[in-house]
Amino acid sequence: MKIVADDRIPYLQGALENFAEVKYIAGAKINTQDMLDADVLITRTRTQVNRELLENSSIKLVVTATIGHDHIDKKYLEERGVIWKNCPGCNSGSVATYIASLLATMMSDHGFQSKGKTFGLVGCGNVGKRVKKVAEALGMKVLINDPPRALAEGKENFCNLETVLNQSDIISIHVPYIRSGEYKTSALFDDSKLSQMKEGAWLVNSSRGGIIVENDLEKYLDDNSINAVLDVWENEPNLDLELMKKCKVISSHIAGYSVDGKANGTSMSVRHIAEFFDLNLKEWQATNLPLEDKKIQVKEGELGLVKAIKEAYDIMDDDKKLRCTAENFEINRGQYEAHRDLANYQFIGDEENCKKLVAMMPEPVIKK
């Protein structure tokens, strides 16, 4: 068996070599020639998996070590009879940690009082469910807009998008990028939607660029009627530098890039391959991760909570890095020094704040 793998997938080297020939190549450089005699492709979002790449290959299985799969031409693979797998929920704890740090920063640097505020979730799948726990632990009321879930589960616990726009003090987007159809998300937040947001509300996008129309957003940033936090961008890796300067917080598409998120994606990818080929790796898990079970001392009061979250991960470190080297967006992302999820830490000290932190940390995606 031959496997072609993106060389930036962490903790993968050595996992499959006893079962296959594994060729590691930069994701953006994987080409048709590389794939000719390959049985498996393990990829990330930087490889476009389509007819052009796979036309003459012997491919049997495509695995992306990511939640997102809009880089995969699923229709073409289905026509070929090729199975594809993604890793749903792998970085959900990472995004929840990113949002927790953002809220801590809003509280410490922008006078944001979380208790009693309304948090709007647009999309509440694996990631959104974890973000919901963070918002609730900080005393926020959560409104959920997720049309597919509302259709499947009933409308009782869901809101229409207009309600979320009108009532939320902060809106966080956690939807897949869908180009067309009933649940299209491309250009979802255009002028007509942005104009319905509350004055002074915060808009956070850590899902996919292109869900917010950046040209439309910019005018609301100019008059300070909306505060923007962008981790993802329309034309990555080419950022709109003027838009970047107007955002309150920015980062290089790394909200899901924690050590745990990456390790989960790799672990799930190896398990997908093991299931497909019946290999003795069905419980394989990435090991030797840094900062295992570090203890964080938590003091009382809001400041104590904020400091504990920031000690685990400070979003402003990533903000500063991108503002200083925006032209190196892709390099920053590729060489990112990942942090750990909140769930990795042992929080000790003030009982009330420790309970809030524990409430932000549901069960791990990958079981030991």
Image (tube, rainbow, N blue to C red):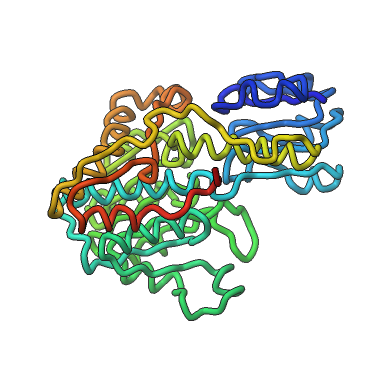
Q: Where is residue 255 in the image (x, y as percent from the top left)?
A: 42, 41
> Residue 190 vs residue 80: left or right?
left
Q: Which of 22 and 351 is in front in this view?
A: 351
Q: Which residue is drawn at 59% across and 34% down?
A: 266
Count of residue discs: 0
Q: Residue at x 43, y 36 (%)?
A: 258
Q: Where is residue 194 in the image (x, y as percent from the top left)?
A: 37, 60
Q: Nearer the viewer, residue 246 or 24?
A: 24
Q: Position of residue 127 (x, y in %)?
A: 48, 53
Q: In this view, does 316 lie above or below 187?
A: above
> Residue 64 vs residue 10: left or right?
right
**Quarter location, residue 359:** bottom left
Q: In this view, does 80 lie above or below 183?
A: above
Which quadrant is home to the C terminus?
top right
Q: In this view, does 218 lie above or below 139?
A: above
Q: Which of 339 and 347 is in front in this view?
A: 347
Which quadrant is home to the N terminus?
top right
**Quarter location, residue 340:** top left
> Residue 213 vs residue 6: left or right?
left
Q: Which residue is drawn at 27% across and 30% down?
A: 320
Q: Position of residue 33 (x, y in %)?
A: 79, 19
> Residue 139 vs residue 127: left or right?
left
